[in-house]
Amino acid sequence: MSCSAISQAPTGGRTGWPLTAILIKISLLALVSIVCGCSSHKLAPPDAQRLIESSSRFTAPDVLRVRSRYCSTVNAPTDSPASGLGRLQALEGTGAVRIEHRAAAPGECAATPGPMREWLLLSVTDIGNGFHPRPLADATGWEFTLARRRFVSIGEVTFNSDDEPTIAHAAYKWAWKAELLGQLLQTSEEPVNAQATFIRPDATWELRDVGF
């Protein structure tokens, strides 16, 4: 019997129906409502949020990786994207690292432009250790955590089909929640728009792309 046929069956309005029959009817209608509501296999927004928040890409923090030494040009502009000097000086400004300058010997830093080349030698300070930096795998520097993602809100979930959908897209917003070092470096906490993609190869929805 179809969902509509069951839902349109008599509900006990007729006099003389036994109480037991009425209770059975109510239970049957509740069961049919659950079964029919799930028959479309559509991804519910709370489930989409759960899949997004539990993904490794979403939980991956925003990090700043720095090496223990860099080649640079003496008096290089701090806004040079190639040198990254502004980033290093900003980190030094928080007290997390100390930067020492040492003139490059002949033949050193040959790939660095300019006649006056130098080494920037970084060391983590006591303040920096309070930010719990992690040594890089090759022991050539450190990784500082600046922020972690937080889920802000979820919007519309759309499907490739109303019946038995296999692909879904969910619009949502996320934002960084800055750690203390991230706050000192002025990490933005403004919400960011994203769209996650989900697939259903069988009976279970899976996150295909977190969308950022």
Image (cartoon, grey):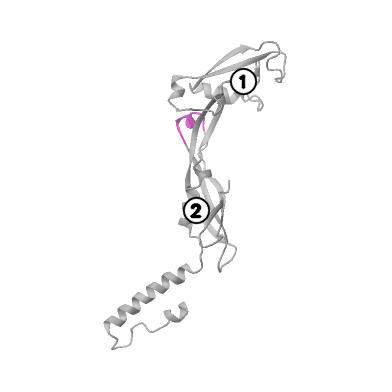
Q: Reply yes or no: does residue 172 show up in magenta.
A: no
Q: Amino acid at mark 1?
A: Tyr
Q: Earlier in the sequence, mark 1 or mark 2?
A: 1
Residue density around tag 1, few if under 14, some if 14–19, many if 20 or more, within 10 Å: some
The residues tagged by marks 1 and 2 sit, at their Cα atoms, a distance apart of: 43 Å
Quadrant assignment for the C terminus: top right
Describe the element under mark 2 as helix, strand or loop. Answer: strand
Q: Which is more toward the observer, 47 or 147?
A: 47
Please tell me which residue is depicted at 50% across the width and 60% down the height of the picture.
Answer: 204
- The magenta segment is 178-186
Describe the element under mark 1 as helix, strand or loop. Answer: strand
Q: Which is more toward the observer, 203 or 173?
A: 203
The picture places residue 136, in percent across and down from the top left corner, at: 54, 28
Q: Reply yes or no: does residue 181 show up in magenta.
A: yes
- Between circles 1 and 2, the one closer to the viewer is 1
Rendered position, 100 above or below 15: above
Which mark identifies residue 154? 2
Rendered position, 60 above or below 138: below
The picture places residue 43, in percent across and down from the top left corner, at: 50, 60
Q: Is residue 191 left or right of residue 6?
A: right
Q: Quadrant of residue 113?
A: top right
* Residue assigned mark 1: 70
Please tell me which residue is depicted at 34% across the width and 75% down the height of the picture.
Answer: 27
The picture places residue 37, in percent across and down from the top left corner, at: 46, 69
The picture places residue 196, in percent across and down from the top left corner, at: 56, 52
Q: Amino acid at mark 2?
A: Ile
Q: Quadrant of residue 25?
A: bottom left
Please tell me which residue is depicted at 53% across the width and 55% down the height of the picture.
Answer: 206
